[in-house]
Image (cartoon, rainbow, N blue to C red):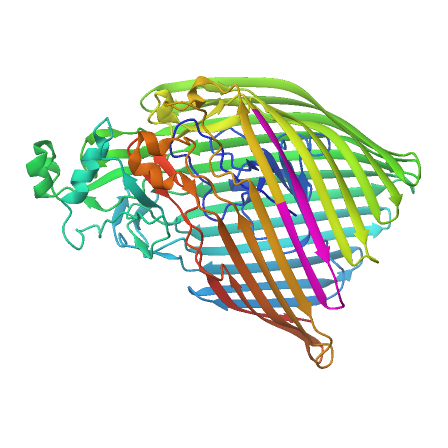
Amino acid sequence: MLLTFRALPRGFPQETPRAPRGAVSFTLRGNVANAAAPGSDKAISTYLDGVYIGGIRGSVFDFADIERIEVLRGPQGTLFGRNSTAGAVSVSTRDPSGDFHVRQEFSAGNRSLFRSRTSVDLPQIGAFSAYVTYVHDERRGDVRNLGAGTVWDRTKTTSGIGVQTSPKWLGSKNVDSVFAAVKFEPSDSFKMVYKFDHTENNFTPEARATLAINSADPRGVGGLLTAILATQPPGGGPFGLVTLAPSGKRPDAINNAYSVPGVIRATGHSLTTTIQLTDTFSVKNITAYRKAFSYAPATIAGLDGLVITPALAAIIPSFAPSVGRQFLTFDGNNQGDNKQWSSELQFNYNSDLLTLTFGGLYYYEKTRNGSVPGMPANYAFTTVGANGVLATGGELNDFTTTKSLAGYVQAELHVTPQFDIIGGARLTNDKRRGSHIDALVGTLPFTYENTKPNFSIGLSYKPIDDLLLYGKFANGFVSGGSVAGFAFKPETVRSFEAGVKADLLDRRLRINLALWDAHYNELQTSQGGASFGLPTVPVLVVNAGKLKAYGFELEVTGAPTDGILVGGSLGYTHNKLENPPPFLTVPNGGVYVLGGNPEWTANINAQYESPALFDNTRLVLRADANYRSKSFGDPNPNIGQSIPAFGAYSEVPRRWLLNARASLKDITFGPITADLALWAKNLTNDRTMTFPVGFATIFRTTSYETARSYGVDLIFKM
């Protein structure tokens, strides 16, 4: 599996919301699965046991009982349908075994890490079998909060939140997950499997720090912030010490006084029924319901804890009534709900000549995303408990209802034992309606409907048993819609791919190579609302025109001797915007680039497994290193020329992440076997900034690579 990384392109250096800590986010072939705006979709679809997961919040779960993960690269517009222009990630959990098993895992590590996983398989009773798994996973954050203890009284809001306190550590998590499955299999030709999952993640937002302030900001806001910083009390005021982080490296402490604990909850139900009508023909139905909730107020600017001092009031007399009050630069309040229903009916035929899959899918989704009820969506340059100094947003909400109906067919024609022709088609009808309700603007309703065909065709040829050559063409789309009255069109892509899969040297060497070329049209990009005269709207989705992308992916795995496994992967991705719209042009010439998109990614790994040391106990040693080349940290490649204060942060430096694990496997104690392991992630404690963004021409902020973690695992199996 080889993944490439980039952030969504932005026309102006504006902040766009990221997935809350704990939400699942994938990047693949130069695209990111981050539906940043309400009512928008992801370019990489996520499936859990065949169920499409709509939106980031709905994909928050601890993968406790994985059977396999399939990463399907490139457009997946036939079997996987809408919203998969860059690919799809399909997670399959295991079915009940019908045999009694108990598995208990414990992990402990630095930063108060504690993880426990308990899984119990029950013995089969008649046609029924079942299992249940419970996971608890907690860890302290990696950056100390200098604004810890700041109290936020929200008892007067309609949200029912009450009083909250800014946490001592940023980036903490406390997750509880339950996964259960029940199988009813009265015969070899009929099977029903019900699966349930529930996850609750109580977290503190990750640290966000201000890298630089542009004191020459033409609007004067940068100068105002510079003046406020210069008048702060030595050692910090009542809301903690406020510092910048100009090094670009993760600090040990930063003031995020506005950030408070958040929560993400996700629950899912699915029922899969399979009927084997004949030896060659079967029918499957997957019916599912999911819901999710998120609450995530957090700093966006990373410059919390500022206080209006008498010294500042002496410089700016209008601040005199606000002396002693906290000054907020840019902070957000976000709360969202998501509910979805889906049902898919699939028919499968399999013979020596033909493998055929066809069926239909109904999908319904209802979402609300916006500010915490009774609170504005964001605070921008305002004092706490006073009227706004420059601006403050009003309460806003986005309500969206989506209905999707699709029919599909895919066939594999086995022309000869060595040569296959694969083709597929899908027709999807999307209907979307909703409204953007802004306390300052009013209600902006919208409707969207579109029917899109997709198809794919491919050839595969095996000249010998251990060599496969293939080529394919596919297209796909991401659904359109509207945000805050700004309509956006569907994103479409057509892609070519060719490759080879080879097992050589008596299957001791495996080589997979893929060459790909993709042409996007009406590329959907996330843009700050302020860029389009909507300062109260955090983010919009706009079409950025055409994007041409191409690259290759190489994976090599070797087993030179028994017990030794070495491997690696190398990926190259090149993106270029063609004929971009005016909002994607740089003021002093050129075109905005796709920030956060490294051209090169790589992985190197090695594993040693010893012969049995005693009984069946073996020693396993493993290490891996992940590399990404430098990338633009700002969509404006010339930012240093126009804003010298931001020039040092125009690029995210290249970095290596090292991980290691040593374990003793299958230690036997009568009927119980145990594994004991020591492990470390980010072994060198890389502190690289990962997502630097700017707020207009005022300041630049960033988040960071997660700090080094290490610990011990103890696993019991019976």
Asked whether 551 falls inside the magenta stretch, the response is yes
**Residue at image location 44% in from the left, 23% down from the top:** 584
525 lies left or right of 588? right
Asked whether 31 falls inside the magenta stretch, the response is no
Q: Work out whether residue 278 or residue 632 is closer to the camera in this orientation and state it.
A: 632
Task: Tell how many labels.
Answer: 0
Which residue is most to the left? 314
Question: How far across and how far down the image is residue 394, in percent?
Answer: 31, 28
Above or below: residue 423 compared with residue 190: above
Q: Work out whether residue 181 or residue 466 is closer to the camera in this orientation and state it.
A: 466
Residue 53 appears in view: no
Question: How far across and how far down the image is residue 343, in percent?
Answer: 69, 34
**Residue at image location 81% in from the left, 53% down from the top:** 504
Res 395 → quadrant: top left
Question: How far across and how far down the image is residue 712, in percent?
Answer: 53, 70
Q: Work out whether residue 72 or residue 445 is closer to the camera in this orientation and state it.
A: 72
| Quadrant where the image shows the C terminus | bottom right
Residue 399 appears in view: yes
Q: Looking at the magenta stretch, what is its main secondary structure?
A: strand
532 lies left or right of 419? left
**Residue at image location 57% in from the left, 36% down from the top:** 30
350 lies left or right of 13? right
Above or below: residue 479 compared with residue 346: above
Above or below: residue 473 compared with residue 1: above
Task: Write the start and end of the magenta stretch as one range.
Answer: 547-570
Question: How far across and how far down the image is residue 456, in percent?
Answer: 75, 28
